[in-house]
Image (spheres, rainbow, N blue to C red):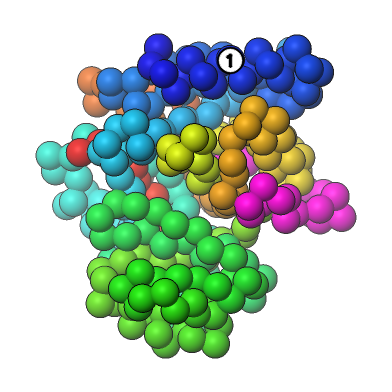
Amino acid sequence: MNRFQFTFFVLILMGMSHGLFAQYSLSTYSSLRNQDISIFNLSKGGSAYGQAIWMNRSASGKRIKAKYFASGNAYQSFKNWKIGKDIILISSGAYSEGWTSNSTPIGLCVDNGRIVNRNIKNEMDGLVIVEAVGGVRVSDIERNDLTLHSLGKRKISPRRDKITLLNWGSSENATIFQTHLLAFENTLRVGTNGSHESANRRMLVLATYNGEVIHLVFHITRNVTLYQAANDVQKTLIKRGINVVGVLNLDTGGYDILKVYNDQGYPYSDISGTVNNLSDATNLLVYYYE
């Protein structure tokens, strides 16, 4: 167990002793890639709820990187790119306008520098930027304070300065997409008055702890509302001293894809989405170890 894992388990025990352990219980499923990645089983009230894949980018020396395939034939693009790559995780990402592999993601989208969709979807306030170097950032479109480093310290509005954002994404070979922002800066953004539809859920969390950058994917296999899932994820982390930068919804609709790979490069059979065939993907979020 590395230093970060030990600290996290101490925080878990602290939460239990102070009556704060009201959300997910976590138990170790596996440790991967020199213990830079951990998989935890989730449970609540004695029932299994899925898994959390915990990726410490700082501890790994930023060897954990992300790549997003947003348009065209996402699977073929991924297949050509993945040669020689140590793949950690593959998941469906943004919502798509159709049901074919060539469907366009809903909302503003840039795919590896290529502008795919210029239309901002006002109902989706989460803007995700996957940089060419493998980093991931999240911004709240409503805040109008997105900072792009190559533009200096200037803050822009994704809506008002959309052309600037698109040109930046193109020149930086970045990938940009929209999704629902469920929590931002430790504040829940989805309420109890939202949709009461119950389904399995998947969420991407960007967080920090003691200056370390953490990416997590919560894979929730029980049918719950979006509020229930987001609230449980948010409280599970915050009550253990984890600073939640953003919680983003990942699509688990018609193309619910998730594969997590062990150190030998084989996928775990019991951690997966409902769709097994990657060739059906309309878009793919990929984490890899370099």
The kind of residue tagged 1 is Val
Q: Position of residue 158 (x, y in %)?
A: 52, 78
Which quarter of the picture shows residue 34? top left
The residue that disc 1 covers is 10
Q: Quick check: can you spot residue 91? A: yes
Q: Secondary structure at mark 1?
A: helix
Q: Position of residue 18 (x, y in %)?
A: 78, 17
Viewer-proximal residue, 16 or 80? 16
Which quarter of the picture shows residue 117? bottom left
Viewer-proximal residue, 181 or 284? 181
- Residue 192 against residue 261 in the figure, above or below: below
Q: Residues within 10 Å of mark 1 (few under 14, many from 20)?
A: few
As drawn, the residue found furthest toward the right would be: 193
Q: Position of residue 177 (x, y in %)?
A: 46, 65
- The part of the chain drawn in magenta is 183-204
Q: Position of residue 32 (x, y in %)?
A: 33, 21
Viewer-proximal residue, 280 or 61? 61
Q: Is residue 196 on the magenta stretch?
A: yes
Split into 4 quadrants, where in the image is the C terminus?
top left
Which residue is at 51% across, 35% downward? 209
- Residue 232 against residue 145 in the figure, above or below: above
Q: Quick check: can you spot residue 222? A: no
Which residue is at 44% across, 23% downward? 4
Split into 4 quadrants, where in the image is the N terminus?
top left
**In the drawing, does residue 284 fall left or right of residue 239?**
left
Which residue is at 38% across, 27% downward? 37
